[in-house]
Amino acid sequence: MNVEVDHLRKDLKEATANFGKECQEVEKLKQVSSTYRKELNAEIKARDNVQQDLRASRTAQTLMIDRVDEMEKRNRALKTCVADTFNH
């Protein structure tokens, strides 16, 4: 019986030591996971900012294209008006 009790105590010590090691590994993994989560959130925020800037750039480009088109229309209208004035 004493041999079995000694064996069980030895197993308990080993299990306790292994449990402590596993707890440390879990904590390390939690820290790594937390770091990755922070990095991921930073990347998501950066991506969102780039997408927002891209939308703003597209809007600005569209406005500039519209302005150029309007100026071309005015220029054609002015040329037509001047040509009509000289032809009459």
Image: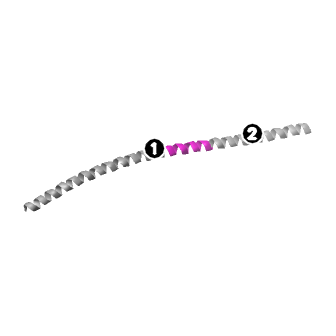
- Where disc 2 sits, the SS reads helix
Position of residue 41 in the picture relative to residue 61 (left or right):
left
Residue at image mark 2: 71
Instruction: Point out the image quarter for the N terminus.
Output: bottom left
Q: Nearer the viewer, residue 4 or 76?
A: 4
Residue at image mark 1: 42
* Direction right: furthest residue: 88
Position of residue 77 in the picture relative to residue 33 (left or right):
right
Q: Which residue is drawn at 87% across and 39% down?
A: 83
Magenta residues span 45-58
Instruction: Give, as a three-letter code, the residue at label 2.
Output: Met
Q: In which quarter of the image is residue 12?
A: bottom left
Q: Which residue is drawn at 41% across and 45% down?
A: 38
Q: Does the magenta stretch include residue 82?
A: no
Q: Where is residue 21 in the image (x, y as percent from the top left)?
A: 26, 52
Position of residue 77 in the picture relative to residue 67 (left or right):
right
Q: Position of residue 74 (x, y in %)?
A: 77, 39
Q: Main secondary structure of the magenta part?
A: helix
* Direction left: furthest residue: 1
Q: Position of residue 79 (x, y in %)?
A: 83, 39
Identify whether 10 is placed above or below 86: below
- Where disc 1 sits, the SS reads helix
Position of residue 4 in the picture relative to residue 50 (left or right):
left
Q: Which of marks 2 and 1 is nearer the N terminus?
A: 1
